[in-house]
Amino acid sequence: MIVYAAMYNWVGLTNGPYGLAGIPRPEFFGVALRTPWHYVLLAAGMNLLALPLLFRLYQSPFGLLLKSLREDEAAAESLGIDARAVFLQAFVLSAAFAALPGALYASYVTYIDPTLFTLNESIFLVAILLLGGAGNRIGPLVGAAVMVFLPEALRFVGLPDAIAHNVREVIYGLLLVLLMYFRPQGIAGEFRMT
């Protein structure tokens, strides 16, 4: 909330509530990306480059360090691992990989402002991770599939527009409560949180 308030009021950097307009679209070899299919191809290309790097990182010694810190931070530190340094490196790497789709989104809509990224968006992303499960590559994909396809499936129920959003939120909450009670590691999670 503090970051949102700062970005919303820092007119010199973010243009405040007016946002940043006129973000240029990328060009490759003189061809400007304009259609949604151009962006689909660019996103697929970015995934083809980024995912093998992430999978290599997952299996690297650094990935093993992260797994050891996830399982038992005190035990990992007792073996000489500097947890703060490893967590800082993981934060920087995750921010760099998250910046790629963020830049792609900004160039696609050509306009961003602080109201595009609210607390609801953050809760939605955390719910995807909690629902699918952490600790492997499949969990977030399962969580994203459920959280994206559930609203689409609810369209066929024929609920009035005035209550459809509220019903969807209730179903999300109920799913999360049931999952935390019966399967805390998520649908496809590797480990059980204690």
Image (tube, rainbow, N blue to C red):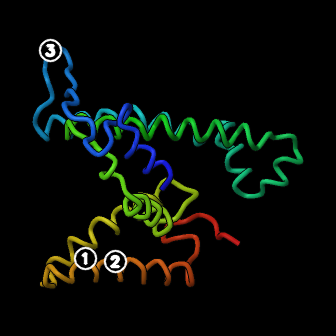
The residue carrying mark 2 is 169
Residue drawn at the location 34% of the way across and 67% of the way down: 147
Report the disc number at residue 11.
none
> Marks 1 and 2, how far apart in space?
6 Å
Assign a secondary structure to mark 1: helix
Kindly give the residue lying farthest to the right in the view shown. 78
Of residues 8 and 94, which is closer to you in this image?
8
Residue drawn at the location 29% of the way across and 44% of the way down: 113
Q: Residues within 10 Å of mark 3 (few under 14, many from 20)?
A: few
Q: Quadrant of residue 36?
A: top left
Assign a secondary structure to mark 2: helix
The residue carrying mark 1 is 165
> Marks 3 and 2, how far apart in space?
45 Å
Which is in the foreground here, disc 3 or disc 2?
2
The residue carrying mark 3 is 30
- The kind of residue on which mark 2 rests is Glu
Q: Earlier in the sequence, mark 3 or mark 2?
A: 3
Residue drawn at the location 55% of the way across and 65% of the way down: 189
Q: Are marks 1 and 2 in contact (CB under 8 Å)?
A: yes
Q: Left or right: where does residue 78 sit relative to residue 39?
A: right
- The kind of residue on which mark 1 rests is His
Q: Quadrant of residue 111?
A: top left
